[in-house]
Amino acid sequence: MVKHVILWQLKDELSDSEKVQVKAGIKEGLEALKGRIDGLIDIKVEINPLASSNAEVMLDSSFENEEALKGYAVHPEHVAVADSRVRPYTKSRVCMDYQL
């Protein structure tokens, strides 16, 4: 199994209320991919970090193998969510993929 974890910071120009809406949209969009992409075992998005955090959104996902992760990266449904709900609103992204 392969884990795929991403941490994002949202753009500074977003108001607090906009950030709430954006985070909810990211969570809804990404979590809706479960069961729709071959090899994707689980996908969860955390949008309520503690004040000690320096990231605002976390994706925690699991894949059958590295090939499944590569397929997810280019899958049209994933790309559509990333292009409409994630990339326009984030200023930084940190990713770690690892084998379990």
Image (spheres, rainbow, N blue to C red):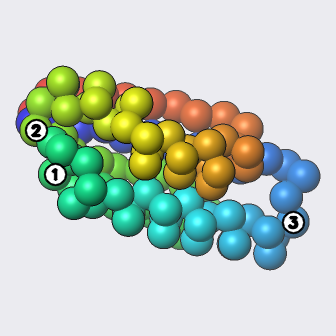
Q: As drawn, which residue projects farthest toward the front?
A: 76
Q: Is residue 86 above or below residue 75?
A: below
Callout 1 touching callout 3 (CB < 8 Å)? no
Report the disc number at residue 41: 1
Q: Residue at x 50, y 40 (%)?
A: 79
Which one is nearer the viewer's eye here, 10 or 27?
27
Question: Callout 3 environment at 10 Å: few (<14), some (14 to 19), or many (20+)?
Answer: few
Which one is nearer the viewer's eye here, 76 or 86?
76
Report the disc number at residue 15: 3
Residue 67 pos. (x, y %) = 18, 24
Q: Residue at x 48, y 69 (%)?
A: 28
Q: Quadrant for the C terminus, please.
A: top left
Q: Quadrant of residue 66?
A: top left
Question: Callout 1 environment at 10 Å: few (<14), some (14 to 19), or many (20+)?
Answer: some
User: Where does label 2 land, which residue?
Assistant: 64
- Determine whether, in the image, residue 97 is placed left or right of residue 25: left
The answer for how far apart the CA atoms under marks 3 and 2 are is: 38 Å
Residue type at the position of mark 2: Glu
Callout 1 touching callout 2 (CB < 8 Å)? yes
**Lower sequence index among marks 1 and 2:** 1
